[in-house]
Image (tube, rainbow, N blue to C red):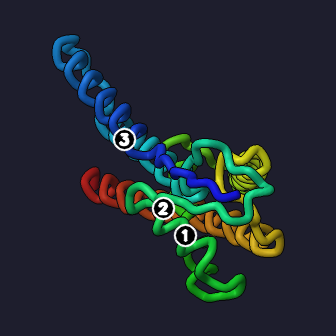
Amino acid sequence: MSATYIIYNIVPYGFILLLSYIFIDIFLDYFRKSKSSNLNRILLYSFLFYLLSLIQIKFGGITLPLIDPADSQSTFIYEGAWFGLFDTMHFNISTFSYSAIFYNLVILLPLGIYLSVLFDLKSNLKAVTLVALICIGIEIIHLLFGKMGMILGGMNYLMTIISLFINIIGGTIGFLLAEHTLKRLNSFKNTGEVKLVK
C-alpha cells in the first residue's frame, strides 16, 4: 500500500502572524505616544523570527495525514524551499561530515547571543544549563513528533547525540562571544567617558 504525504511548512504562517503583530504594535505605539525601547523591540522580533526558523529547520515541516509507520512505499510532496535545507541536513550528509558539524554549531549560536543580549543573562553556568535544556527539549519534541507520525522519523540516534552535543557547544560559544563583545563595548564606552571628563 502506498500513500502520499504533504509536508506543510509552519514558518510562512508564523512569519505572517509575526509581521501582522509588528505592524499592529508599531501602529498602536505611534498613537499612544509612549517611547519604548526600539532596540529591545527589534531584538524581540528578530528572536521570534529566529525561533520560527529554528523550528522549521529542525523539524522540516508537519506531515498531513500522519505518517503510517507500516507504509514503506510512501511518497512525499514537498511544499516550499525550506524543506530542502532540512532534507540536505538530515538525510544527504554523513554523520561525521565537517559541513554537518559546522552547521549544527552555527545554528544555535544566535540562541546564546539572545540569552546574553535580549534576556540579559550573566551567569555562564545558567546560560550553559539553559542552552542544554533547550537543545534537549528540541530533540525530545522531535522524537515525540516522529513517533506520532507528525514529522519524518527514522533518525540516526548517534547523529542525534552528536548534533545535540554540538548544538550545546554552539549556543555556549554564542553566549560567550556576546558577553565578551558587550564587555569590550562597555570598556570602550567607559574609557571614552573618562577622557571626556578630563
Q: How far apart in space, not on screen, are marks 3 and 2 (Cα)?
A: 16 Å
Residue nearer the viewer, 106 or 87: 87
The residue type indicated by label 1 comes to Asp
Residue 89 in the image: state x and y as whole percent: 57, 73
Q: Residue at x 27, y 55 (%)?
A: 198
Q: Residue at x 55, y 57 (%)?
A: 60
Pointer 1 with pointer 2, Cβ within 8 A = yes
Q: Residue at x 71, y 82 (%)?
A: 95
Residue 85 in the image: state x and y as whole percent: 48, 68
The quadrant of the rendering that contains the N terminus is bottom right
**Residue at which label 1 appears:** 87
Label 3 SS: helix
Seen in the picture, residue 93 relative to 105 is either above or below; the reply is below
**Residue at which label 2 appears:** 83
Q: Residue at x 76, y 44 (%)?
A: 148
Q: Report the mark closest to the observer, 3 or 2.
A: 2
The residue type indicated by label 3 comes to Phe
Is disc 1 surrounded by few (<14), some (14 to 19) or many (20+) residues within 10 Å? few
Label 1 SS: helix
Seen in the picture, residue 90 relative to 196 is either above or below; the reply is below
Tell me if 8 is positioned left or right of 115 in this view. left
Tell me if 100 is positioned left or right of 17 in this view. right
Seen in the picture, residue 83 relative to 64 is either above or below; the reply is below
Seen in the picture, residue 16 relative to 31 is either above or below; the reply is below
Residue nearer the viewer, 44 or 51: 51
Q: Earlier in the sequence, mark 1 or mark 3?
A: 3
The residue type indicated by label 2 comes to Phe
Which picture quadrant has residue 34? Answer: top left
- Residue 125 visible at all: no
In the drawing, what numbered circle is on residue 15? 3
Query: Residue farthest to the top?
Result: 32
Tell me if 58 is positioned left or right of 142 in this view. left
